[in-house]
Image (spheres, helix red, strand yellow):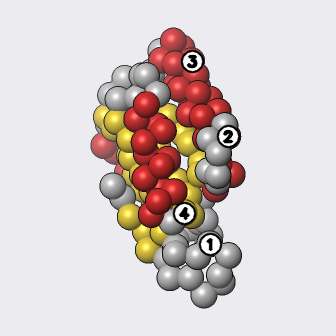
Amino acid sequence: HNRIVLLAGKARDQKTIDAIVKIASSIPQVRQIQNEIEIGRQPTFANTLHDLWLTTKIKSKFIFTAAFPSQRVKVSTAQGTVFLMGLVNKQEAQQAIWIAKQARGTRKIITIFEYTTDIASENSTLRTARD
């Protein structure tokens, strides 16, 4: 999202993680790498299905929440950890986190938001935060 690359999942060792980060870092136009890869076993098919279900559940709640800008918040899930990315104001970020927390099966939430006070303004002040 917005030239920020999220790396998530499991890798067999630190050497593999380092190689993945190096490849992602070499991509032109990438301005930030958010490395959330953990050392461990690859998820089972059941784990993958659960993550897909959880992502779909959260996205659906975003869509059906009145006045929530669902198109501006990306959702990804890995082993029950929900990643939220987007360009939002503080209130929208808090609402997205609250919605994700309500979804049964969410183990942890990691946010990679860029905040703005006026999304329509091209002169908005942005800052990246990881809550």
Identify the amino acid type marked 1.
Ile
Across and down, in percent, residue 75 comes to 56, 42
Identify the amino acid type marked 4.
Val
Q: Residue at x 56, y 33 (%)?
A: 58
Residue neighbourhood size for the residue with mark 1, other residues' Cα within 10 Å, grouped as few (<14), some (14–19), many (≥20):
some
Which of the two labelled residues, at mark 3 and mark 1, occupies the earlier sequence position?
Answer: 3
Label 4 secondary element: strand
Which of the two labelled residues, at mark 2 and mark 1, occupies the earlier sequence position?
Answer: 2
Splitting the image into 4 quarters, where does residue 37 fall? top left
Q: Nearer the viewer, residue 58 or 27?
A: 58
Residue position marked by numbered label 3 in the rendering:
49
* 51, above or below 100, in the image: above
Residue position marked by numbered label 4 in the rendering:
88
Q: How far, Cα to Cα, is label 4 from label 3?
A: 28 Å
Which of the two labelled residues, at mark 2 and mark 4, occupies the earlier sequence position?
Answer: 2
Q: Are marks 3 and 1 in contact (CB under 8 Å)?
A: no
Lateral position of residue 43 relative to residue 56, left or right: left
Where residue 119 is drawn, which disc sits there?
Answer: 1
Residue position marked by numbered label 2 in the rendering:
63
Query: Of tags 2 and 3, which is closer to the observer?
Result: 2
Q: Residue at x 56, y 58 (%)?
A: 86
Q: How far, Cα to Cα, is label 3 from label 1?
A: 34 Å
Query: Of tags 3 and 1, which is closer to the observer?
Result: 1
Which of the two labelled residues, at mark 1 and mark 4, occupies the earlier sequence position?
Answer: 4
The answer to whether residue 14 is visible is: yes
Identify the amino acid type marked 3.
Leu
Query: Of tags 4 and 3, which is closer to the observer?
Result: 4
Q: Residue at x 48, y 38 (%)?
A: 99
Label 1 secondary element: loop
Which of the two labelled residues, at mark 2 and mark 3, occupies the earlier sequence position?
Answer: 3
